[in-house]
Image: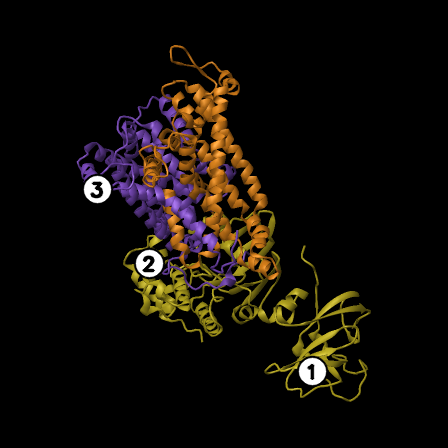
Amino acid sequence: MYSRAYKAGVTIPPLLWVTVFLLVPYAMLFCYSFWSVSPAQTIVHNWNLQNYLQLARNPIYLQVLFRSMRVAASVTVIALLLGYPLAYYLSFHAAKRKDLLYQLVIIPLWASYLVRGYAWKTILGSDGVLNGFLQYLHITHKPVEFFLYSPFAVIITLTHIYTPFTLLPIYASLEHIPRNLVEASRDLGSSPWSTFRRVILPLSLPGVLAGATFAFVLTLGDFLAPLLVGGPSGIMISNVVVSLFGAAYNWPLGAAISFCMMLLVVTMLFITERLEKRLAIS
Amino acid sequence: MTKTSPDAAAVGTAATPAAAGAPILSIRQAIKRFGRSPVLRGISLDVASGEFLTILGESGSGKTTLLRLIAGFEDLDSGEIWMGAERLDRIPAHRRQVNTVFQSYAIFPHLSVFENVAYGLRAKNTAKPEIPERVTKALAMVKMGDFAQAAPAKLSGGQQQRVALARALVNRPRVLLLDEPLSALDANLRRQMQVELKSLQREVGITFIFVTHDQEEAMALSDRVALLRAGRLEQIAPPREIYGEPATAYAAQFIGQTNLLRAEVCNGIASAGSIVWRTFGASGTATYSLRPECIRLANETGAAAFADADVSIVRFRGRIRNQSFGGAMDLIEIDCGDARVIRARIAKPGVLTGERGFEFVVNDAVRVREEEPD
Amino acid sequence: MKGGFQSGRAPLLRAYAFLVYAFLYFPIIVLVVYSFNGSGVGGFPPANWTFDWYRQLFSDGALWDAVLNSVEVAAVAVAIALGLGVPAALALDRTNFPGKALFRRLVLLPLILPGIITGLSLLMLFVAVGMKLSLVTITLGHGTALISVATTEIFAGLQKLERAQEEASLDLGANHWKTFCRVTLPNLRVSLIAAGLLIFTLSLDEIAVSFFLIGRDNTLPLEIWSRLRRGITPEINAISTLILAFSIGMILLWYRLRTRLQRGDESAAPLVPASIEGETA
C-alpha cells in the first residue's frame, strides 16, 4: 500500500546523505590507504600496498597494536565482570527500586566522556586525589607514579567509561528471559546457582556478546583516554593514527591503519551477529 | 419498517440502486501471499449493491486480508478487484470510495469526536459550511449527537465504535467495510449493536461488508454469508441456505452443529452403519450432514429399521449414551454401534435410558462434499 | 552468582552491586567535590570550601563563546539527525525493498564504529572538496554520526504507534503526506522530543569526531581539551560539574519521556482485547 513515491520519499534522502557523508568518506579512507607521501609532504596517488606491508613488518606498529588489543581485552573482561553481576542484580533482585537503579546506570553512560576522563586524570596523578588519600592515611610516603600515565590508567579510565555500555545489552537480554523458565528450573530441583549456570547464563549470552563487542571495539578505537591519562607508555593504536594525521603527516599510512581497524570492527560485528542469531531464543 | 429517517437521508444512499445483477464490487481470482505462505488462494466473488455481506471464517482463513485488500492496505499478488467499471486495486487507498470501521476503532486521540468525524470531509476539501451539518447528522444517526466536543479518551468502547461508524459513514462511501467491529464488546452490548447495525444498514442503503469469526453473528445480520476456509471461498449463500444446504462438510460443521454421516451409496440406498435411507445421489462413498434438531423420538411401536411404507421418514435405533439439559432442547448422545455417535437435540424428551428408536425426514440429510484444503 | 531468585536475599550480590555503583560514581563525586576545593585539584582531604572557581568561570569570555558555538552546532545537528532519522525509521518500519538490511546496517554503523574512523573519513571528504574546517564541518559530522541515534529512537516510537490510525486516515481520504502531518507526527511527539533531547546532549559532549573537524572556533569540549593541554585547573572542575549537571538533567528528562512512551499514553488506546493479537488473516 505504500506507493513507489512514498518508498522513494523515505529511503532516498537518508540514503543520499549517508552515501555522501559516510560511504564516500569511507571509500576515500580506503583509497588513501593505497597512496603514499612524497618527501615534499604531498600526497602521491601511486596505488600500492606499501602501507599495509609496512604495518605488517614494522615491529613498532605491531607492538602498539598488540598493546591496544591487550588493553581492549582487559577492559572488556573487567567491564563484563563488573557489568554482568550488576545487570543480574537489577534484573532479578531489584524489584522495587529497579527503575531508579536503572536510571543510575544510564546517567554515567551519557554524561560527558571528557569530563569522566578528566576526573580520572585528577584522581590518579601524583598530586591527585588517590595519592593524597594514600599519603593522608600514611599508607605511602611519596606519590605513586604509575597510577597515571600508564596502561593501567588507560584501562581504569576506559573500564569506567564503557562498563555501562556493556551492562545495558546484558540487562536487556536478562530481562527478556521468561521468568517462568527460571521458575520451572527451580521447580525441577535446580539450585539458584545451578539455575543460573544452566538456564540464565546461556540465555543471556546474546547480550553478553553484544556488550563485549561494544567494549572491545570502542576501546580499540579510543584515542582520547590515552592522550589524557596514558602517557608515552600508554599509547594505543588510535593515537598512532592521530599523530599520522597530525605532526607525523602520513595520511596514507594513517588511513591504512584506520581501514584495518574498520575491517576488524565490521568483521567482529558480522561474527557476533551470526553467533547471536544462533544463540537467541526465537 | 424501513422508514428513512432524515438523518439517513442526509447521509444518503451512496449509489442509485443498480440494475438487478450488477454487482457493486467484483473480486476476481484474488491471490495474496505473505512471504512464502499463501493467504488467499484465488477468491472470486461478487458483492451486490446494497447488500449486507458477511465474510465468515476462522483465524487464518484470509478474511481480514480480503477486507484489507478491498480497503487498499494490502496489494494483490494477482487477480483483480473491480468497483463498477473501474479497477479498484489500481487506485491508492485514500482515493477509493470505500471506508473502513477498524477492529480497534482507530479513533484519533488528539482530535475531538467532531474533528474525528469531520476528518474525511476535510481531507477531501469539502465546503466548510457543509461540514458541521453533515457531521452532526452522522453523529445523530449513531446516537452520539451529544458527544461532539468530547475527547475520545473519555469514551467507552461502545461509544468509540459508534464514532468510528459515523466517521466512516459521513463520507458516503459506496461500500463500508467492518473488520470484526463487535468483537471487543461484551455479549449484551454486542447483541444490541448487531440490531442497530442491521437497521442502520437498511436505512442508509450502503453496501456493508462485515468480517467476523462468529457464525451466529453472521447468520443474524447478513443478506448473504461468504464462508472462507484457508484462503478459499467455501460457500456463499444467504444464511438459511448455507445452514440448511451446506455445500461441504466444513460449512456444515462451522455453521451451527451437525452430524456427519459417512455413508456408502449403492443403487439408490445410502447406508451409514445401521442408518439406511433412500437417496438419488451417485453411488460410492458420500458424506451427509444431519442437523441435531432434525432428529425426533420415534414412536415405540417396535417397528424395524426401514420397513416402512413412508420412505420419507428414516428410522434408526441407538443406545442413549448421554443426555444433558440445554435450555429449550436437551442434547442427546446416541450410540449407534460401530463407534458412531449421533447427537440429537430434542425438546422436552423426558428422561431417556437404554435403547430407543429415533427418526428424521430424509431430506434433512444433506449430501456435502468433504475435501481437505491443500 | 549466589542468591535466590527474587528472594531479596543474596547480600553478597547486593554488596557487589553497590561497589560497582561506587566505582561508577566515585570519579564524578570527586570531580564535583573538588570543584569547590580551595586548595586546588588534587591532594586530600579537600579543604577551603569556595565558589571562586565558579566565579572565574562566569567572567571567562572564551569559554562562553565555546558554549554558544556548541549550542548552535547541537541545535542544527538535532535538525539534521531528526530530519533524516525520521524518514529512515519510516523506511525501516514500514516498507520493504531490496537492500533493506544493508540500508539498516549502514545507517546504524556510526553507533558502534569508533569516532576516530568517522571523524577521519569526513576530514578526507572535506579536504577533497576543498571545504575549510569550521563549525559547519563539525555540525555536518555531528548530524551524520547522530542519525543512527535518531533512527533508533524514532523507530521505537513508530512501533508503539497504532498502525490502524494511519490506515484510518488514508481510508478517510487523506494522502500519505497529510496522514504523516496530521496523524503520525502528533503521535510521535513524545519520541521526537526524547530523541531531540538525547541528540542535543550527545552533540554538546561530542569530542571524538569533532577532534578532526575543528576549524578556528571551538566547541565546549574542544575548548576544555585545549585548556587541559596547558595544565589542569579547578576551573575545569567547575565547568565539568556544570556540564555534568546539565547532561544529567537532560538524560533524566529523556528517560522519563521514553518510559512514558513505553507504558503507553493513557489517553490513547481504545479497548482492544487480547484476542485481536494473532489474527493475521
Cα separation, mark 1 vs mark 2, equals 59 Å
Query: Marks 1 and 2: which is nearer the front?
Result: 2
Instruction: Tell me if label 1 and label 3 are in contact, CB under 8 Å.
Output: no
Can you give x and y, in whole percent of width and height, for residue A148 in the image? 37, 32
The chain coloured purple in the image? C
Can you give x and y, in whole percent of width and height, for residue A183 in the image? 56, 60
User: For the residues tagged 3 and 2, is the chain the same?
Assistant: no
Q: Residue furthest top?
A: A39
Query: Marks 1 and 3: which is nearer the front?
Result: 3
Query: Disc 2 is attached to a residue of which chain?
Result: B
The residue located at (46%, 21%) in the rendering is A31
Does any portion of residue A16 appear in the rendered image? no
Q: Colour of chain B?
A: yellow
Name the quadrant of the C terminus of chain C. Answer: bottom right
Write down the residue under mark 1.
Answer: B296
Q: Nearer the viewer, residue C203 or B200?
A: C203
Write down the residue under mark 2.
Answer: B111
Q: Secondary structure at mark 3?
A: loop
Q: In the drawing, does residue B78 fall left or right of residue A118? A: right
Write down the residue under mark 3.
Answer: C48
Q: Nearer the viewer, residue B159 or C100?
A: C100
Q: Colour of chain A?
A: orange
Q: Please say if B275 is above or below A262.
A: below
Instruction: Tell me if label 3 and label 2 are in contact, CB under 8 Å.
Output: no
Q: In the drawing, does residue B118 fall left or right of residue B31? A: left
Marker disc for residue B235? none
Q: In the drawing, does residue B142 fall left or right of residue B346? A: left
| Mark closest to the chain's N terminus, 1 or 2 | 2
Cα separation, mark 1 vs mark 3, equals 104 Å
The residue located at (47%, 39%) in the rendering is A214
